[in-house]
Amino acid sequence: MQENDQEGRTAESAASKIQEAVNAAGQNDAAVITPESAVGGVVTSSVRSGTVEITKDGSDASAVLNGGEDGLPISLGLPTAEDAKDARVSADGTTIFTDPNGLVDVGVQTLNDGAVRALTVINNSEAPVEYEYQIDVEAGVVLEPAHGGAILFKGRDGSSEGAILPAWAVDANGSPVKTHYVITGRTVTQVIEHKAEGVAYPVVADPKVYYAWWQLFTWSEWRWNGDYRMNQLSIALSAWGRHDVIFNAGQFLTSGWNLLRQKHSSWIFTDSMRQQWECHVLGGLAEWGTFDLEYERPSNPNWRSRIGSVWPLSATCNW
């Protein structure tokens, strides 16, 4: 009983370090959800159309991500120590694999925007600098490096079916630690340069994986705007959606719009809403993370002429 209590305290300590690092790195835009069950050998979580199943076997840990009908099934092998303890679920919902040697603990979180975040907690300088994630994905899908240090899952038709967002790492002081990915076939290695001078331990690093188109948005819903006295479709972009707006706006212009039309009745989408969408995505003046498309705004095919001529800038897409 004492050993189990100690393992529990170690898991909670690792989860606490992870949360501190997530906050310090500005990666707290999506909340951790609590797993539905942790019975048998699997920790299971559900979020919207997706499911995540994490094996509890510390020596051969993996996470199976399934985005549903519009998703990409992925098995993600985790870089746990060979003799890592079997997983425990911490109070905040993080699945933790602790290293009995105290070098590297591994945590996995399912977030409310659908993403899965895998985190290494590097406790001292004796730990490795490279961490391999073995990725098992359906035939025809390839991993390609993308702008900003991200990795895209590309389908046979060349479209992006998922993404691993750019790597990040911070030390115990919240200072960034240099890190990047290396792709070798279907293995993604995160290189974390934690042995540099001045790094304070523990160091926490993560890949964040999106595996379904619906994860471009955290949510989308119709609302009544009392100021404008009209209905609007409000959309919160996920971290993947924001990354695409910055680095892949041309594709996001189509993929995001198609996703909205799939989720909501397509007949309600007006010419003006499409123009507002283009303005937010391409005009460079989008509210950071949230778009509002008002249903009853008149059509304005010349909306581009408003860029730089309307004040405040936030009003550019509201004509």
Image: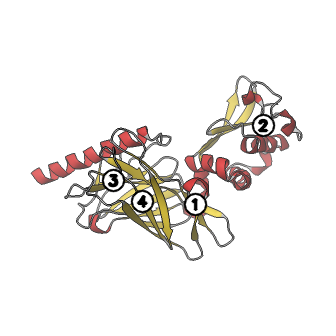
Name the residue that disc number 1 marks.
162
Query: Which callout, 4 or 3, points to the residue nearer the camera?
Result: 3
Which image quarter is the C terminus in? Answer: top right
Judge by depth and name the residue closer to the eye, 274 or 268: 274
Q: From this viewpoint, which residue is outermost toward the front?
A: 197
Name the residue that disc number 3 marks.
195
Name the residue that disc number 2 marks.
295
Q: What is the secondary structure assignment of the residue under circle 1?
A: strand
Within 10 angstroms of label 2, few (less than 14), some, or many (20 or more) residues? some
The amino acid on which the numbered mark 2 sits, given as a three-letter code, is: Tyr
Query: Which callout, 1 or 3, points to the residue nearer the camera?
Result: 3
Distance from disc 1 to disc 3, alpha carbons, whole Å, reads 32 Å
Q: Does residue 305 lie above or below 12 as drawn?
A: above
Within 10 angstroms of label 1, few (less than 14), some, or many (20 or more) residues? many
Q: What is the secondary structure assignment of the residue under circle 3?
A: loop
Residue 301: percent from the left, percent from the top?
A: 89, 41
Instruction: Return the disc, 3 or 2, that comes first in the chain's sequence.
Output: 3
Distance from disc 4 to disc 1, alpha carbons, whole Å, reads 21 Å
Residue 43: percent from the left, percent from the top?
A: 35, 58
Distance from disc 2 to disc 1, alpha carbons, whole Å, reads 30 Å
Within 10 angstroms of label 3, few (less than 14), some, or many (20 or more) residues? some
The answer to whether any part of residue 152 appears in the image is yes
Distance from disc 4 to disc 3, alpha carbons, whole Å, reads 11 Å
Q: Could you say which disc has been placed on residue 291 in the image?
A: none
Q: Do the residues labelled 4 and 1 touch (CB within 8 Å)?
A: no
Name the residue that disc number 4 marks.
191
